[in-house]
Image (tube, rainbow, N blue to C red):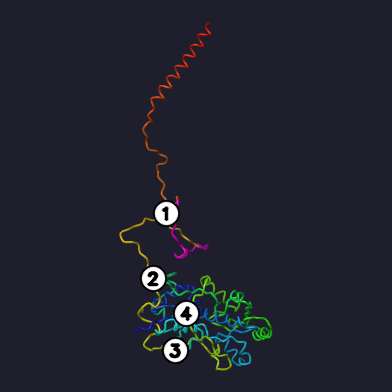
Amino acid sequence: MTVPSLLILGTDAVLASAPGTPVQLAHACLAAGYQAVIPASWGDELIAARAMDRCRRAEAPVVQCSCPFVASRFAAHGEPIASMLLSFVAPPVATAEYLRALYAPTPLHLTFAGGCPSASHESIDVWLSTNELTSALAERGIITSAQPTEFDSVIPPDRRRFFSEPGGVPSRSALRHLPAPVEFVEVKADDLVIDIAQHLLSNSRALIDAAPALGCCCSGAVGGVSPEAVRARVREHEPPRALAPVVDHSLPLALDSVSPGILPAPPPLESIPGATILPPRPPSVPDLAPDPLPVAVEAIPRRRSPPGLTRAVLGIMPQARIEAGRQLPRAYVARRRSSPRGLRESAVRHVEPPTAPRAEAPGIRWFMIAAIGVAVGLVLAWIFRLGR
């Protein structure tokens, strides 16, 4: 039995692929042998939905704790405020658990590419850092920036968001539309402890987020960008928001995590020089599949025209370009009906075919002769009268 090999792309791995786009990075990973490339935003969606359920019932401010770095910070004093913490697994783990439940009972070989230390979880078989993923693609001669910029003939995993922001927190809009609105508070790194303490002592309904300030990779806190701008940078590489949930929230998943302080916390940020590669499970499946495996995502064949029939396309294919002059991908270009500007004009203008002269009716001719005779007679009578 062939075990499907799937790759979960972390947010920092997508950012590190620039100037390549997320779609080009997915194509590169598919060319390396993975059957499907899954965005870690699926885990963000699952966690954000759970956080909204908790916020719907909360009557006091709470802190979202779904990042290992946040859990590490609260590990020393997490037990006294455990009731104020929304403790969940990290987005990569949520994505892995979701995929295993989605494909069950088929076993999976899951690889995560990114810097989140939660990838050491047992649900993930192989952990690759962003540098190791880039090196593995380069060794195979796969250039990310040379890959197609859109998908053709297949439906890729949906990268849109509905509930979440990068890192798994609910969006401000989703929190405002709860029966009792909840304020979203993003604390800053400079006054982290003071800000969290002040908000926890207030009586407002608020969701406090400290992940970007503590260097959460899933939020996009990489590359020296200020915590206030990390999520906006991630959203620049994502499609518009979805109008409905993009994952199946009815699957039974264990996404709750033990509050910090009860179990040993994950290793701190400064102790993690990069991603640690775990031995694969099972060992017979390599990190990067050398040969393409059977496709695990639904493939839709391209619809072809009936044989023996041709259809002429008149006019000119419109070119869609941005302000800088770069041509947009063909996904943004559509054919249209031809206009007069797109057709070659005839060199002969306003030439009517010769027509035979009309045949006059006989009655009309005799009427005209009689009328002329009467007129001549009247003129002669008038002249004869003047001569008298």
Crowding at dot 3, Cα within 10 Å, few <14 / some 14-19 / many 20+, comes out as: some
Looking at the rendering, the stretch of residues picked out in magenta corresponds to 322-339
**Can residue 227 be seen from the camera position used here?**
yes
- Circles 4 and 2, Cβ within 8 Å, touching? The answer is no
Q: Tell which of 331 and 101 is nearer to you.
A: 101
At mark 3, the secondary structure is loop
- The span from disc 1 to disc 2 (Cα, nearest Å) is 30 Å
User: Reading the chain from its start, which is encountered first: label 4 or label 2?
Assistant: 4
Residue 1 vs residue 206: left or right?
Answer: left
Residue 300's label in the rendered image is 2
- The span from disc 3 to disc 2 (Cα, nearest Å) is 35 Å
For mark 3, what is the residue? 278
Q: Residue 328: say if magenta.
A: yes
User: Reading the chain from its start, which is encountered first: label 3 or label 2?
Assistant: 3
Pair 3/2: label in front: 2
What is the chief secondary structure element of the magenta stretch? loop
For mark 1, what is the residue? 315
For mark 4, what is the residue? 9
User: Does 94 appear above or below 377?
Assistant: below
Q: Position of residue 355 (x, y in %)?
A: 37, 34
Crowding at dot 4, Cα within 10 Å, few <14 / some 14-19 / many 20+, comes out as: many
Q: Position of residue 124 (x, y in %)?
A: 45, 86
User: Reading the chain from its start, which is encountered first: label 1 or label 3?
Assistant: 3
**Can residue 167 be seen from the camera position used here?**
no
- The span from disc 4 to disc 1 (Cα, nearest Å) is 42 Å
- Name the amino acid, label 4: Leu
User: Reading the chain from its start, which is encountered first: label 1 or label 2?
Assistant: 2
- Circles 3 and 2, Cβ within 8 Å, touching? The answer is no
